[in-house]
Image (spheres, rainbow, N blue to C red):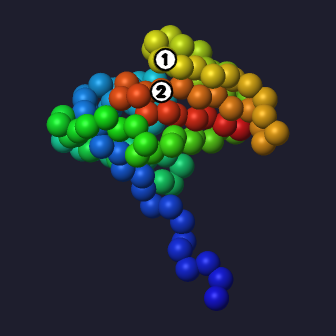
Amino acid sequence: MGHLLDGLNHVAIRVRDIEACARFYRDVLHLYLRSFDGQMAFFECGGTEFVLIGDPGQRDSSGQLAHIGFRVENPEKLDYFAHRVAEAGCPNIDGPKSTPGGRTLYFTDPEGIVVEIYC
């Protein structure tokens, strides 16, 4: 029957501080912010939509999401983002390091969500 799904359309994440998270993904990771109404932020990233949903009453998010993975073309771009996230004070930076699948960088966003950038 083949593939019935054509691709991933979007990823949506609930966050407590929508302002801080929207700034982080726009300013540090340079995602294109398509729209923001104070409650939801819609970003475009390589044909997939990335959505932040403001939910100030959200409980601890551990266990709800393993990580978000973003792909870059080459090690130079990965190193650029390693520098950007270090400048932004992102905790738990692991890498950049070589793995059997390529090079990876792991860090956490302002809500503690693990983000991976790989090439």
Q: Is residue 53 above or below residue 82?
A: below
**Residue 102's image quarter?**
top right
Secondary structure of residue under mark 2: strand
Residue at coordinates 56% horizontally, 42% vertically from top-left? 69
Rounded to the nearest whole Å, what is the CA distance between mark 1 and mark 2? 6 Å
Pick the quarter of the image with the C terminus: top right
Is any part of residue 38 visible from this angle?
Answer: no
In terms of depth relative to the viewer, which is nearer, 20 or 59?
59
Q: Nearer the viewer, residue 22 or 15?
A: 15
Q: Out of 110 and 9, give the one closest to the viewer.
A: 110
- Residue 24 in the image, given as x and y percentages of width and height: 39, 26
Instruction: Name the residue at 64% across, 28% down.
Output: 105
Name the residue at 78% across, 34% down: 99
Quarter of the picture containing the N terminus is: bottom right
Label 1 vs 2, first from the N-terminus: 1
| Disc 2 packing (10 Å; few <14; some 14–19; many ≥20) | some
- Residue type, numbered disc 2: Thr
Q: How many marks?
A: 2
Mark number, residue 91: 1
What type is the residue that disc 1 sits on?
A: Pro
Residue 116 in view: yes
Q: Are marks 1 and 2 in contact (CB under 8 Å)?
A: yes
Q: Residue at x 59, y 15 (%)?
A: 83
From the top left corner, tell me how far across and down residue 49 is, in percent. 42, 52
Instruction: List x then y, in percent, for residue 55.
Output: 21, 40
x and y, in percent, of residue 30 in the image: 47, 30
- Helix, strand or loop status at disc 1: loop
Label annotation for residue 108: 2
